[in-house]
Amino acid sequence: MDSAPPGPVYLAYRVPALLVPLCALYVANDIAERAYGLRVSGWLLTLLYVVAIPIYVIVSSRVNEYLDNRAAAAVGAVVPTKLAHRWPLGLDIIKDNITSFKENLPSDNLLRYTEEYGNTFNFRILGENRVVTIEPEHIKALLATEFNNFEKGPVIKRQLKSVLGSGVFSSDGEMWKFHRSMTRPFFTKDRISHFDIFERHAEDAIDQMKARFKEGFAVDFQDLIARFTLDSATEFLFGHDVHSLSAGLPYPESAVEAKYANEANLKHPSTAFVKAFADAQAKLAMRGRFGSAWPLTEFWEDSAKKCMGPINAFIEPILQDALERKNNDKAGAEAEGADREVKDGETLLDHLVHCTEDQTILKDEILNMLVAGRDTTAGTLTFMVYMLSQHPDILRRLREEILTKVGPSRRPNYDDVREMKYLRAVINETLRLFPIVPLNGRTAINPTVWPSKRSDGKPYYIPAGTRVQYSVMLMHRRTDLWGPDALQFDPDRFIDERLHKYLTPNPFIFLPFNAGPRICLGQQFAYNEMSFMTVRLLQHFSGISLAPDAQPESSKPPASWATGEGRKPAEKIRPAQHLTLYATDGLWVRMTEASDDSTA
């Protein structure tokens, strides 16, 4: 069934429901003809059959809405305010969401909705019920206090399956517990505080940057840092460095050197993987705009699965390398199963191949870990460097802390990273304004009631089966939660009195790594990697500036943003999202190399 076209599979799944209006129309027509002698013309009957299904969906949606409102009233609650729509089945909402996804800042359309309907609202598209919230109390319920009542759910599983399979990001229940238990032992302090892997790849990346700057060209920092995190993640998690940095750096499109050098870069296996993986994630994200009906937009062919050729070709050597190590490990072969003890020096993948022989599960885990270990860290470092390019005073202060604590050349260690409070504040402020997973969701298993801030005091009723989406990005930018300067990049908010005024009494207003039982296990690993690379970067470079001459036109904000709301007028690049946040077509920068006696 996995290889069958998505559209027919979806329709087959929905056949029982779809037959109801068709059968009802057939019976009504038969009774009218037999009992009353009424004969409906062929063209009219055909038209009625065509419109029967959408009418049935609309009526069913209205009936379900009525029943939800009755169930809410029975417990003294209300369903969150419903988003108004002009077209049947909320098709105009789908259109707006698609337009916003392609053209605007992530969650831009949701911001518009929250301004009109409040921080928690309800809408129905194609007959399916959804709730959106940016309220910390409600997100806390989703992730922590009512964790057992919310799951990823069947819709998200089907949406992600063709790429991420049954990996940790899309799984629930026992499968999620299996992935979680397998991963946890590899993110202990002892394992994540050794920086040898970071050092090798950071040195390579920085040397390549210096060489390119000396040639007089800008560097796509997003491309470079994604290669750094890919090499670091594959070596740390899988024991297999894929050497993506060996592909070299791309030149700006306008450079004479670009044609030959960029062709060589594009032919590298890691480049093909990265492009295919990004394309696949974009297709998965687009599916979310259509809910469970997404197969109708990919009727005869799974568009995400089409990207899997380069992805599978990339991860196959990683898996085979781990299987070969397992076969050569005579002592380890005696200890099989999920409860086996993790050995010193063993990677996550080494452990997994001893726990299961299911290559589908193993490949799913590799891809899920690459999203967690590569995309998230690379995205955060990209937006941090972007922010430092726009705030030279913050860059100067950060360099001062680095040079004071570590010096101009010494490699930072775990204690150095832990003691650099301003560095952590800069990273946190980047994660606040540019959370790497801006939008996420869960599905209610049973009906529940949440507190609201309505004037009548009535709580919100969340029906069973409701898909609840939450925008961390919008919550992180709320002025009532973070202060009147919430849209400004100011790391001091994580150090000065604002920390105790806003975040300390309400920690759920800051969730870059999620929270509750599904909180990111690699959180401290990510902080260490980002901190290490930042220290090394600013030991070598004293200034960062954007290179608008090297930026492709597609990476620049449209002219309409200059008069837009929120941060739009301030942006010099174009943030976008698939499953994670990224800069459209790269972050092209120039950096000033630090002099040997530089102290600021």
Image (cartoon, helix red, strand yellow):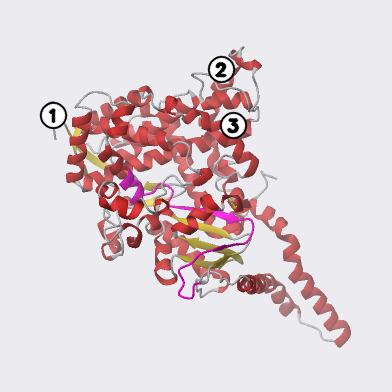
Q: In this rendering, would 345 be left or right of 173?
A: left
Q: In the structure shown, which secondary structural element does the residue marked by tag 2 occupy?
A: helix
Q: In the structure shown, which secondary structural element does the residue marked by tag 3 occupy?
A: helix
Up/down of 202 relative to 254, above or below:
above
Up/down of 276 relative to 283, above or below:
above
Q: Are marks 3 and 2 in contact (CB under 8 Å)?
A: no
Q: Earlier in the sequence, mark 1 or mark 2?
A: 2
Residue 69, position as x, y percentages in the image: 61, 73
Q: Nearer the viewer, residue 86 or 194?
A: 194
Q: Which image quadrant for residue 242?
A: top left
Q: Which residues are magenta?
A: 428-457
- Specify few, some or many for label 2: CA neighbours under 10 Å numbering under 14, 14-19, or 20 or more: some
Q: Are marks 1 and 3 in contact (CB under 8 Å)?
A: no
What residue is disc 1 on?
Answer: 595
> Which part of the image, by quadrant, shows the C terminus?
top left
Q: Amino acid at mark 1?
A: Ser
Q: Nearer the viewer, residue 117 or 318?
A: 117
> Which part of the image, by quadrant, shows the N terminus?
top right
What residue is disc 3 on?
Answer: 362
What residue is disc 2 on?
Answer: 325
- Specify few, some or many for label 3: CA neighbours under 10 Å numbering under 14, 14-19, or 20 or more: some
Q: Amino acid at mark 2?
A: Arg
